[in-house]
Amino acid sequence: MYMLARRLTAVAAVLLLSGGVAFAQSSSDSSDKGDQERWDTVRNIYFPDRVIEDGSAFITLDAPYRAQDAALVPITVTAKVPADADWSIKTLNLVIDANPVPMAGKFRVFDEQQQKALSLSTRVRVNEYTLIHAVAETSDGRLLSTERYVKAAGGCSAPAMKDPQQAMARIGKMKLNLGQPVTLGQAVTAQVLISHPNHSGMQFDQISRTYVPPYFVRSIKVSYDGHPVLAVDTDISLSEDPSLHFSFTPKTAGALSVEMVDSKDQTYSASWPVTPQPAS
Amino acid sequence: MTRWFLKLIISSMINGMKAVAKAGILCCAIALGSGFGVAQARAEPLSVREVAAGIFVHVGLHERADESNHGDIANLGFVVGDEAVAVIDTGNSPAIGRGLREAIRARTDLPIRYVINTHMHPDHVFGNAAFVEDRPVFVAHSNYRGALMARADGYQRRLEEDLGAEATAAAVMVPPGLTVETSGEVDLGGRVLDLKAWPTAHTNNDLTVFDRRTRTLLAGDLVFMERIPTVDGSALGWLRIMPELAAVEADRVVPGHGPAVAEWPQALDGERRYLTSLVGDIRAMQKEGGTIDRASREAAASERGAWRLFDDENPRNAVTAFAELEWE
């Protein structure tokens, strides 16, 4: 009980409900009744009294069915809004139902092309076999969801990959990988890498008999030429050294800027000049 | 709910023989308390081969650990000196460790003075419990304890899943009494073993053992042959130490996985080629904006035919190396 109590202090209160159901389900081969019940619990926490429509016609969630590394599970969400639709996507919620804090990230999308044709990738920790949900909020106030079952366990409690000195020396460093060519008015894919240990609070240190305190990226804001592109509110579920793939549409030469705030309220930022070529 | 049967023996002061002896007694008591029959059952001696005078090696299977093989998947060895014996790695379970101990006892009555763990992976350390009654000095890299303890819960769970609760109930994690930061030696009476702690490669706590008398290198998992290497430390780090490792003036090597004995340093050729291919492929993919997913499917594909269990381990190696190389 002592250990359990310690664990609970380390993470948000929602885990009581979801974690309790989760444990009994951890050996199931694929999504079953228990997984759906857990989703009902989780969605009532994050989207109380809201109707969630089946969005699988518009949204695709890609994740390995069986993850290679539960602490580093690549997730890609793509969404296509029909050309004649009068709605678009404003926000994408990524929910890992069985994680202690199920809401892995809330991605607010500002780029107009992305609101119609979204593509986002990140890497997450998966603590046990679970459904993952991508829930889009549309400009006309609806919720559209799609889901995927992932077999992975232990991702939140897995020890850090890097050694602690290396992690601290590099904290807040960022890298940008930009697709080529960059053309005016055309969407280009970018990857931002942020060096941060992103401790989940569930990594137990058997020597000190304590949990490594949670220490993670809380928000990431991406802008281009002073205009917001993407804003992400996140929690303990992102992998160590968070990675974010997204697209944006440069309408002029400018700087791609990223500002990150972590759970110690430290702000880190980086900026890269981008010179798009005129469309031929 | 049953917890993980995790019986951690941690004393705050581990250094020195006294503490080891004390910890040893405590280990014993706890193991006996929960599984007297299991801990004391006589085991069939493991088959071993004398690869050089006084150096005996048991060859592990190239299989995943499961109940039918009892986790007998790693090479284990012992060196017999004039006054004492040193064990190098103990197997994936107390049962394997007991088999190794029987193999030693079938050959010598000399005391088992040292149990050396070449790194913290379960297939090399979970047989330690079988030797606690001998009160040896447990020897490991100075990073070993931290690396093992950080993974203890997960290892214990996996051990139970793979081998069953009964087989693993007596597994104890024994803290080392002698840790090696850079180099050290142990004396078996007229026979000195040189110990070398390496920078992060296969893991962050790789330790090799060199027998001066026969010039034999017991390399642990710094040398994989036949079975695909697993990267749980640093692919780049492993490649970086390769020249220094190859320069060890040994007449033969005992790999951590592979045959009982192999030619040195040719034994390194396969894993050097594999790691070079893994790193090269991933660098090329990253240059074209390739994803971690693609790397897990395609990296080092040219090596598929060269290794046992390739598809079991290569995708995970690729994911680990991809994350490392992104920050190169």
Image (spheres, coloured by chain):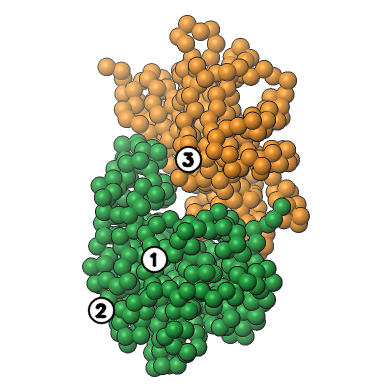
Chain colours: A orange, B green
B112 relative to A216 in the view: left or right:
left
How far, Cα to Cα, is label 2 from label 3? 43 Å
Answer with left or right where residue A94 lies relative to residue A69.
right
Q: Nearer the viewer, residue A273 or A202?
A: A202
Label 1, on which residue? Answer: B60
Q: Residues within 10 Å of mark 3 (few under 14, many from 20)?
A: some
Q: Are marks 1 and 3 on the same chain?
A: no
Task: Where is residue B221? Give x, y as percent.
Answer: 39, 65
Mark 2 surroundings within 10 Å by alpha-carbon count, few (fewer than 14), some (14 through 19), many (20 or more): few
Residue at 65% of width from left, 33% of height from top? A34
Q: CA distance from mark 2 to mark 1?
A: 22 Å
Label 1: chain letter: B
Residue that carries the numbered disc 3 in the rendered image: A66
Does dot 3 land on a helix, a strand or a loop? Answer: loop
Q: Quadrant of residue A146?
A: top right
Comparing labels 2 and 3, the label whose residue is closer to the camera? 3
Q: Residue at x 30, y 18 (%)?
A: A279
- Location of residue B23 (image quadrant): bottom right
Residue pointed to by mark 2: B251
The amino acid marked with disc number 3 is: Arg
What subunit carries mark 2? B
Q: Which residue is at 64% across, 47% downward?
A: A264
Spot occupied by residue B250 in the image (x, y as percentages of width and height): 28, 78
In this rendering, the label closer to the viewer, 1 or 3: 1
Badge nearest the viewer, 2 or 1: 1
Q: Is residue A98 visible?
A: yes
Give me the C-alpha separation between circle 1 and circle 3.
27 Å
Q: Secondary structure at mark 1?
A: loop
Instruction: Check contact, mark 2 vs mark 3: CB within 8 A.
Output: no
Percent of width and height locating residue B40: 59, 75
Identified by mark 2, the residue type is: Asp
Q: Say which chain tag 3 marks.
A: A
